[in-house]
Image (cartoon, rainbow, N blue to C red):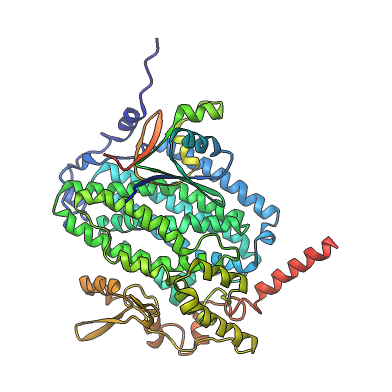
Amino acid sequence: MTAKKLGLKQRYAHMTRGLDWETSYQPMDKVFPYDTFEGIKIKDWSQWEDPFRLTMDAYWKFQAEKERKLYAVLDAFAQNNGQTNISDARYVNVLKLFLTGVSPLEYQAHRGFAFAGRHLRGVGPRVASQQQSLDELRHIQTQVHTMSHYNKFFDGLGEFPHMHDRVWYLSVPKSFFDDARTAGPFEYMIAIGFAFEYVLTNLLFVPFMSGAAYNGDMSTVTFGFSAQSDESRHMTLGIEVIKFLLEQHPDNLPIVQGWVDKWFWRGHRVLGLVAMMMDYMLPKPVMSWKEAWEIYFTEAGGALFQDLARYGLKPPKYADIATEEAEHISHQNWATFYQYCHAAGFHTWMPDAKHLDWLSEKYPNTFDKYYRPRWEMWAQAEKEGKRFYNGALVQLCQVCQIPMVYTEPGDPTTICFRESKFKDTRYHFCSDGCKDIFDNEPEKYVQAWMPVSQIYQGNCGGATIPDVLAWYKLNVGADNMDYVGSPDEALWNSWKADAVKAAE
Amino acid sequence: MSQFASLTFYHNDDARPVVDAVIADNPGVRITNMPGVVKLDCEGRLVVKRASVEERLGRPWDVQEIHLVLISMAGHLDEDDDQFAVSWSH
């Protein structure tokens, strides 16, 4: 009679526990020098639970299978000229923003989790962080592979790593991750593992990728969901981190609450870019940002924070303000990029009448009252050959680095300005959320690399806009300006004309 | 306020037996279809049972194969050889 096979829980325990050891040549505190300075108290690392009982051999097996499926789709997409079957070439601009703004964050996440996977003292979180680190490397690689096909045909994709480090609006996502990676390992885990992965990334990878599917981009939806299938594991790591820290010591609660407040607000600001992608940049929209916010923050976040209340953790500070902003943020961001796309690596445009009606329907409280009239004014100016571009450089928020374009809570007709003084210098903020973050750690944020200030200081290629664009490696006349009149538009129209001819 | 446990799957042939099993085994499940994905929500708890998936699939199914079709989730996870459950209960 053969022995009964071990159950998953026992098998996992044998494969992962007891493999670690107490160091003897060097004291443990020297081997793990970073996991105490943040003030987090851990009494017993062995209390860490791994919700996904995924051993390394199973991990490789499933990841390999995911890759095979993904690359089969990418091959099919390239072989069948899938780029000609997307809804409209305007769509490709979401890929430009994704590749320059989001994909490099996957690489930053890879580095960040590699650091956490080295420097957390407990073996459970170390193994989980190392798996996540490998996942994140897979994500940047698959995204670059996917979008390299579009780069053969469309502008704005070819210089993404160079642009990520330099272009003004890309400092928003870049500085977000720089901030997380220069924190200690526990703050990093709460920032990225919990606040970003658990509370916010669904908004990026589920409704937005569903939109990619709806717009005929088979390859992007496939990398998106392939990445997001790792995300389920990342989300459980995020929630496990917060439970573990709160269960280990009551002194951890105020520290963790501060990080949750900070990183919720930081993440909310970064995701404003996704709001604009969903509401304006998908030629066939699927779900408004406001609807996505209701499902993934109000409902899902509500359930989560209701659960965490048993530890005394409160919902993030300013969550109510963020929910109010869900009615405005996509419109305010699109207005900004509409005015400044002469200095951006992607195209913007005024939505057509059908799209405007969709926005009116999705935003009955705000769109017709505050935004539609402005859009119609700009559309009229275009008709008269006076397409509006804003030539002034804007003031940026010292924390999120977004131009100061957002409005006061409760008053969408007044721009919100906040300021703090630190060592005789005045710093500016877009919101109370960003001001609080600065006031808690001014020494950190005064060091921020602020794109507009850097231009004025002469560190960005020269004093004029063309000098700066050359320093960005932005191909003027192709990568930037309105979609109407762009080489992308001409190419798309020629494909469509050929298709009509072929059908005749 | 309601506390939905949630699982989101690919909308494809590989995921279909899993999605069908979840719908059959979790009365009151709310189904949201989006292009390419289906989101399943249920008050309190949502469970995927190996036996139900195998019945529909017609072959043995390792619960961890769920990694190939699962896109997102909400709730605390409890996974063993026979089921994969997310819940907000303790």
Residue name at image x 66 percent, y 55 percent: A78
Q: Looking at the image, can residue A97 be seen?
A: no
The location of residue A77, given as percent across then percent down, is 65, 53
The location of residue A111, given as percent across then percent down, is 37, 57
Residue name at image x 20 percent, y 54 percent: A33
Vertical order, A121 against A158 (above or below): above
Vertical order, A165 against B52 (above or below): below
Residue name at image x 58 percent, y 76 percent: A349
Vertical order, A223 against A44 (above or below): below
User: Split into 4 quadrants, where in the image is the N terminus of chain A?
Assistant: top left
- Number of labelled discs? 0
Work out which residue is located at the far top of the displayed protein and give it.
Answer: A1
Answer with left or right where residue B19 lies relative to residue A48.
right
Work out which residue is located at the far right of the displayed protein and give it.
Answer: A504
The location of residue B27, given as percent across then percent down, is 43, 36
Nearer to us in this view, A48 or A239 = A239
Nearer to us in this view, A421 or A24 = A421
Quadrant position of residue A15:
top left
User: Split into 4 quadrants, where in the image is the C terminus of chain A?
Assistant: bottom right
Q: Looking at the image, can residue A173 be seen?
A: yes
The location of residue A192, given as percent across then percent down, is 34, 57
Residue name at image x 83 percent, y 65 percent: A501
Answer with left or right where residue A366 lies relative to residue A127.
right
Answer with left or right where residue A154 lies relative to residue A289.
right
Nearer to us in this view, B14 or A344 = B14
